[in-house]
Amino acid sequence: MSAERFDTVLGLAHRRGLGARIGVFVLYALMVVVFAGPLVALMIGAFSKVVDPTGFSLVPDGGFTVRNFVAAADRDVYHYLINSFVVVGFGLLLQMLVSVFAAYALARHKMRFAALIMLAVLATMMLPEEVITIPLSVVLADVPPFDVNLIGTYAGMILPVGAWGFSILVMTEFMKEVPVELEEAARIDGAGELRTFFSIILPLCRPALGVIGVFGFTMIWDQYLLPLIVATEPSQYTLPIALRTLRSDEEVGIGVLLAAAMLALLPSVIAFLAFQRQFVRGLTSGAIKG
């Protein structure tokens, strides 16, 4: 993809001359500073010998060190990191399973109340987390009809994120675009329901799986209120909760806090890079149809 295409999108391709070039350079420089500046400051601060926040600098005088990450281990940051990985791992797996099966039922089967079901799914996306926090805590304290208390357990952090309206919506709309002829041909060849789903439908939905994988990972990883109401002991905290406790601890230096923040940021970046190809294909597939 050439630079001219980006210039055209930004409306700068028809601008010529030295003044226009300087303006473009300044615009791009500002964009880099705004979007990449905080990330660069975070990375440098995590590896610098920062004690006083007012003395923070992008070029630290004392050089770089990993002491902040060692001190983070003394504050059980890596234990909180493992807790976050456990919740995200099982939560994302459950969320993607629920999304693909629910989407398959809504997209490939004629259901009498499919429109109402989809409306209910969309309605869940309109409720802020703050609104459902108290009702959710009441339900988790006594899950009907089993009368099970999930407060203080990993299951209490995993089950509520097992179904997400956004993932179901994306998978449903993507599965609707899969040609019905492929499914009919598989049935003529003797393929059953599950074999058709796993051999025909699901492989064609890999771009959509990349999209819901990235967004689902980020959604679960950034959960704050849910672990806050479920965790009853500090050993059950996830990393976002730990960042809050570290921020309120006066004995923790800014360098340790930045190191913990960097550990909280890296998994989301790695998840995007891992699903980057499917993610981009999933976002652009709807734009190139027709």
Image (cartoon, grey):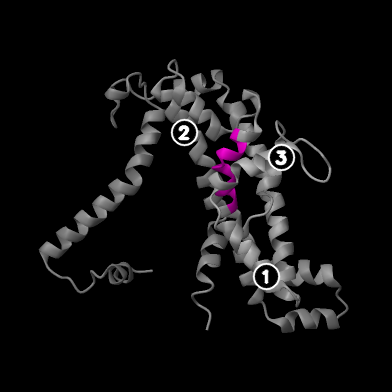
Relative to 191, residue 223 above or below? above
Relative to 94, residue 236 above or below? above
Q: Position of residue 118 (x, y in %)?
A: 65, 68
- Determine which of the numbered discs, if any, sits on residue 43 in the image: none
The image quarter in which residue 210 lies: bottom right
- Is residue 69 rendered to the left or right of residue 82? left
Q: Report the residue marked by disc 1.
A: 116
Quadrant of the frame with the N terminus: bottom left
| Disc nearer the start of the sequence (1/2) | 1
Q: Amino acid at mark 1?
A: Leu
The image quarter in which residue 157 lies: top right
| Disc nearer the start of the sequence (1/3) | 1
The residue depicted at 49 percent of the width and 19 percent of the height is: 71
Q: Main secondary structure of the magenta part?
A: helix
- Is residue 65 rendered to the left or right of residue 146? left
> What span is in magenta?
216-228
Q: Report the residue marked by disc 3.
A: 140
